[in-house]
Image (cartoon, grey):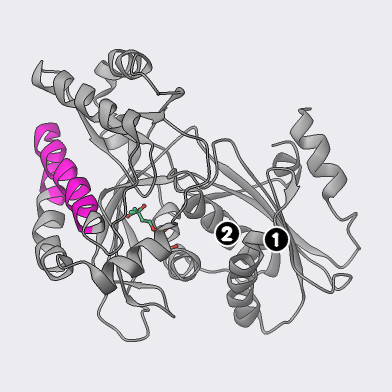
Amino acid sequence: MSVMSRTLDSDRSPGAPNDRVAAAQAQPNIALIKYWGKRDVALNLPVVGSLSITLDTLWTRTEVRFSDALDADSIVLNGKSDPKQLKRTSACLDLLRARAGIRTRAAVVSTNNFPTGAGLASSASGFAAMVLAGDAALGLNLTPAEQSVLARRCSGSAARSIFGGYVEWAHGSRADGEDSVATPLLPADAWPLSVAVAITSTAEKAIGSTEGMNRTADTSPYQDAWIDSQEADLAEARAAIAERDFERLADISEHSCLKMHALALAAKPGLLYWNAATVAAMHVVRSLRAQGVPVFFTIDAGPQLKAVCLPSAASRVAAALREVPGVLNVVETGLGGPAHLIPTAAAAAA
Ligand code: DP6
């Protein structure tokens, strides 16, 4: 048993006989065609569709315990009570409670095996795991599509972490957002890819995705061009995946990443998520690719660089990134499966 699990056990409420409890695991996903901007902030509806890959060895494990003995929701994240996360956690629990027609409060205990809040999509895996665990605890029997819609309302990218492999999340056109749901395109093992995450900072990011994309929509002069060009990018990525054409996927993915950052850089004040090591790592990936190594980069709202490559190139790519000044660590992973329930003891042992 790790130090972390002893901390978690001591933080966990002892539990009463009528408690409704379940646990789930979800993995982060990385968007190749990015989500940035909302068409409805209250319902968390995206202004564009997006396309992602779900990862394998990085995970969030979350236990949700609804108990009549509780008079408030609580969240313990990585062994520590985390009041900053409480508002969003309670808002997500409210959606589950509304489905079940109850007001019972819940204790959430969640562990990530990767740095939280640094552009590694901890909100995606976190809210996907919370929705699955909450669904099971309350016996809601939601379909994966319904889970995806609920997870989307908690954090947009969480809609995609319900599913494994290659996933597309539609922006939808209905005002109520019920058609803004993720669907799986291809399972992970149908076209295995490797991902090397170059961690260049473990600090919490200054401007989170929600604030960043809202500022961008309000102030960036490129917002309309971003929206207008997204359907073509999605079609190109879908075709590349259907044909297992790595070069084609590489070109369109780097384009979408750089376009999202160009859009955000042009906000007022401009959003600059990269540090010097991020940029150095971009150059290293580009130079590997120029030498014929099948690899491309993508970067989200933080300073980490994710290098996506064919498995045959994984060790070479990871070794090259480890040499980049300012890269603190390189985490290697493949593509993974969908979010799933786990025994509550497994969440406790995380
Ligand atoms: C840059 O899903 O974290 O990672 O819906 O406001 O919770 P909210 O935002 P979030 O945004 C993720 C943005 C991104 C691109 C992506 O994952 O598609």
What label sits on residue 132 in the rendered view? Answer: 2
Establish whether ligand 1 lies closer than 8 Å to the Cβ of label 1: no
Establish whether ligand 1 lies closer than 8 Å to the Cβ of label 2: no
Where does the image place residue 184, in percent across and percent down from the top left? Answer: 32, 54
Report the predominant secondary structure element of the magenta stretch. Answer: helix
Q: Residues within 10 Å of mark 2 (few under 14, many from 20)?
A: many
Where does the image place residue 103, in percent across and percent down from the top left? Answer: 74, 81
The answer to whether residue 263 is above or below residue 53 is below
Measuring 28% from the left and 13% from the top, which residue is drawn there? Answer: 316
Residue in the foreground of this view, choosing between 33 and 85: 85
Residue in the foreground of this view, choosing between 271 and 301: 271
Name the N-terminal-most of marks 2 and 1.
Answer: 1
Question: Residue 22 is drawn in which quadrant?
Answer: bottom right
Disc 2 residue type (three-letter): Leu
Disc 1 residue type (three-letter): Pro
Boundaries of the magenta span:
237-263
Question: Residue 116 is drawn in which quadrant?
Answer: top right
244 is within the stretch colored magenta: yes
Which type of secondary structure does the marked residue at label 2 adopt? helix
Marks 2 and 1 close (CB-CB < 8 Å): no
Which type of secondary structure does the marked residue at label 1 adopt? helix
Residue in the foreground of this view, choosing between 148 and 263: 263
How many labels, in total?
2
Measuring 70% from the left and 60% from the top, which residue is drawn there? Answer: 83
- Tell me the residue that label 1 is attached to: 83
Measuring 74% from the left and 43% from the top, which residue is drawn there? Answer: 79
What label sits on residue 207 in the rendered view? Answer: none
Which label lies toward us, 2 or 1?
A: 1
Q: Quadrant of the N terminus?
A: top right
Q: Dividing the image into four equal quarters, which quarter contains ligand 1?
A: bottom left
* Relative side of 335 to 5, left or right: left
Q: Residues within 10 Å of mark 1 (few under 14, many from 20)?
A: few
